[in-house]
């Protein structure tokens, strides 16, 4: 089996990167995999020394088929740096596996990813293979090794050239487009109320929500992702060091990694398990504040409060 290349994006978090690399090195397929480590340049002068330490470490990485350090000379920002890396790698390969530097993986992560990329290659409704499994309850008696979900998770992902290049990653007002059709907007936000705030913030150019733009593409083309029933990844970035993750103890971001050491049985996509989707939705709403937060964040009350705060400031 030819292994897909691994792409890791990093800025100045040396300890996170070391933990990520160490977990990958525990995978048997690491020595058959090309590794690209993308190091963006500093956007603040005080970050230069930390980035230099990261780059020194990158040059020492071993345990892979080949290691390709990519050191940016100017700061592109996380979103543009990653998109550029994906584009460049896909000029050579037909698929890739992507990790952020704060992701730790199970010892069979690469086996799972590469086998899934082969199994679902010609199933065009599958946009990506994801490694993270949120700790929500699966339906009683659910006996499969994987499940399907109409969204994407960046916490360890694999995809193919044709799927990735079909996405429009540029800005446009997706919120206004969806609001033209109330039924479509309701369906889009059915994965969890949290997505409403991200959609609006991206459309107002307050943030660059790359994952939201991918989900928009998946929604428009009726696509889904494959997830394991036991997580292959953990996110250790909720420590105040990340671009989007705050400094808080997020228990659900570090579920117990799959240690069963058994092959994954993949299944063809024949529709969704509705109970599973409902359980996932309830979990997402709960970790994002529950019904009170839903009411406060996405109604006129929240908009009025934001205006009031501006007056106070």
Image (cartoon, rainbow, N blue to C red):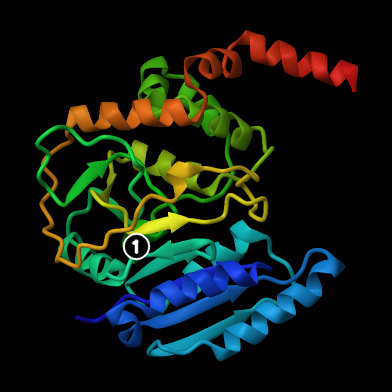
Location of mark 1 (residue): 158
Q: Residue at x 31, y 67 (%)?
A: 109
Q: Secondary structure at mark 1?
A: strand
In the rendered image, the quadrant that contains the N terminus is: bottom left
Q: 19 left or right of 50?
A: left
Coordinates of residue 259 in the picture (x, y in percent): 26, 63
Q: Is residue 42 left or right of residue 98?
A: right
- Residue 181 image offset from top left, x and y in percent: 42, 19
- Which residue sits at x=28%, y=81%? 28
Position of 274 relative to 156 (above/below): above
Question: Does 206 appear above or below 67?
Answer: above
Q: Quadrant of residue 49?
A: bottom right
Dot 1 surroundings within 10 Å: few (below 14), some, or many (20 or more)?
A: many
Relative side of 39 to 253, left or right: right
Figure quadrant of residue 38: bottom right
Instruction: Using the rendered image of the protein, determine whether residue 89 is visible from the camera's viewpoint.
Output: no
Q: In the shown orientation, is residue 120 left or right of residue 251?
A: left
Q: Position of residue 76 (x, y in %)?
A: 69, 64
Quadrant holding the C terminus: top right
């Amino acid at each position: 089996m030819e292994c897909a290349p691994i792409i890791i994006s990093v800025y100045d978090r040396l300890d996170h990167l070391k933990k990520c690399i160490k977990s990958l090195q525990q995978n048997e397929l690491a020595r058959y995999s090309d590794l690209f480590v993308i190091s963006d340049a500093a956007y603040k002068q005080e970050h230069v020394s930390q980035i230099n330490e990261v780059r020194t470490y990158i040059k020492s990485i071993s345990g892979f088929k080949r290691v390709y350090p990519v050191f940016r000379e100017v700061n592109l920002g996380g979103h543009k740096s990653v998109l550029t890396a994906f584009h460049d790698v896909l000029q050579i390969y037909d698929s890739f596996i992507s990790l952020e530097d704060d992701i730790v993986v199970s010892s069979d992560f690469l086996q799972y990813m590469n086998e899934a990329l082969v199994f679902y290659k010609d199933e065009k409704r599958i946009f990506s293979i994801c490694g993270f499994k949120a700790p929500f309850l699966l339906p009683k008696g659910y006996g499969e090794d994987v499940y399907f979900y109409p969204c994407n998770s960046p916490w360890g992902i694999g995809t193919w050239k044709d799927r990735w290049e079909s996405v429009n990653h540029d800005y446009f007002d997706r919120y206004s487009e969806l609001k033209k059709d109330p039924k479509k907007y309701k369906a889009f936000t059915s994965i969890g109320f949290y997505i409403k705030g991200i959609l609006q913030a991206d459309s107002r150019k307050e943030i660059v929500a790359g994952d939201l733009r991918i989900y928009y593409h998946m929604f428009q083309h009726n696509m889904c992702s494959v997830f394991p029933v036991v997580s292959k990844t953990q996110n250790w970035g909720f420590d105040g060091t990340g671009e989007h993750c705050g400094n808080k103890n997020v228990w659900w971001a570090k579920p117990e990694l799959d240690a069963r050491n058994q092959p994954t049985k993949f299944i063809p996509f024949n529709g969704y398990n509705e109970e599973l989707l409902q359980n996932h939705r309830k979990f997402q709403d709960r970790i994002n504040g529950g019904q009170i937060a839903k009411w406060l964040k996405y109604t006129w009350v929240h908009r009025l409060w934001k205006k009031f705060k501006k007056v106070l400031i």
